[in-house]
Image (spheres, grey):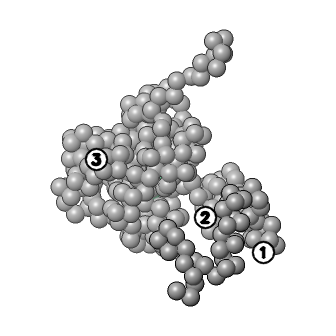
Amino acid sequence: MSATQPKEPERRPVTTTALRAMKDARQPIVMITAYDTPTARLVDEAGVDVILVGDSVGMVVLGLDSTLPVTMDDMLRHVSAVVRGTKRALVVADMPFLSFQITAEDALRNAGRFLAEAGASAVKVEGGRRVAPVVQRIVEAGIPVMGHVGLTPQSVHQFGGYKVQAKETPAALELLEDARALQDAGAFAVVLECIPAELASIVSEEIEIPTIGIGAGLGCDGQVQVLHDVLGLADFTPKHAKRYADVGAAIRDGVQAYARDVRGGDFPAEEHGTRMEPDAAAEVEKLRSRGLRAVAGGVQDEEA
Ligand code: KIV
């Protein structure tokens, strides 16, 4: 770079306090999921603020019907892969089903593993007032926690399906109390999933920590989407998602072209391989034609 060229603006790692400043400055926060090193690298280079390693990995990557079977071991593996691909975004690890619901001690130990073993910067837990004491315990240990209310997929059986939540007044007020309880417990942000837009706006105005919406309208302080939904890699696109690319079609086309080339003898071409030194090739050919084979650094007759 010449001395006259302007320097690239410094891209400092995103922190939880930076997210709070973004809310105060009314600067929308961009969050997306990722589950492995190459996609983490790509979304980080694209400039997202937060990468969530969601337990949605169970559904969009592991082919499961719900997030419930996802384990701590699954999540640790995916979180460390994402951390290895990330330079700037804040990496948040989703705490899987039963990793924080049984005892506060378990919750703290599991949350700590995501930071100490996998290199995440924060964890996310589903639930409102009922998990607030656990959130407080984790935060007191110095671990940033993101809350998650509304349609919390780990409670899908309690909800009777993946349905919009808090459409009626009592449930809306309950949700507002949940968000307040998470803030009071020390959460640094809260995901609002699949709730009416008006309610999400009210919650975003009522609490000081950033709200990150998914299926919750424009009134949130930021948005989160599942990577596979917005890139056309999932079986279907949920109502709350917009398809920004058709990576599925690009993969299918690319693999079809590869298969065509292999079947047609067009791959690999000369430039994709290597050749022996001419003398060595000729010598091997000569020995082969004399029926000789290699033994411990020398040659012997094939009959021997
Ligand atoms: O697991 C996940 O991807 C999530 C987001 C949908 C918020 O929890």
Is the residue marked by circle 1 packed among few (<14), some (14-19), or many (20+) residues within 10 Å? few
Disc number lying in front (1 or 3): 1
Is disc 1 in contact with disc 2, using a CB cutoff of under 8 Å? no
Disc number lying in front (1 or 2): 1
Residue under label 3: 116
Alpha-carbon distance for marks 3 and 2?
Answer: 32 Å
At 70% from the left edge and 53% from the top edge, which residue is drawn? 245
Q: Quadrant of the N terminus?
A: top right
Image position, residue 205 (x, y; %): 45, 36
At 57% from the left edge and 39% from the top edge, which residue is drawn? 45
Residue under label 1: 263
Whether ligand 1 has any atom under 8 Å from the Cβ at mark 1 is answered as: no
Q: Amino acid at mark 2?
A: Ala
Residue 303 in the figure: left or right of residue 285: left
At 55% from the left edge and 51% from the top edge, which residue is drawn? 38
Tag 3 secondary structure: helix
Q: Nearer the viewer, residue 72 or 213?
A: 72
Residue under label 2: 234
Of the image marks 3 and 2, the number of the one nearer the N terminus: 3
Residue 6 in the figure: left or right of residue 62: right
Q: Is residue 195 in view from this perspective?
A: no
From this view, report whether residue 131 is shown above or below residue 301. above
Is disc 3 in contact with disc 2, using a CB cutoff of under 8 Å? no
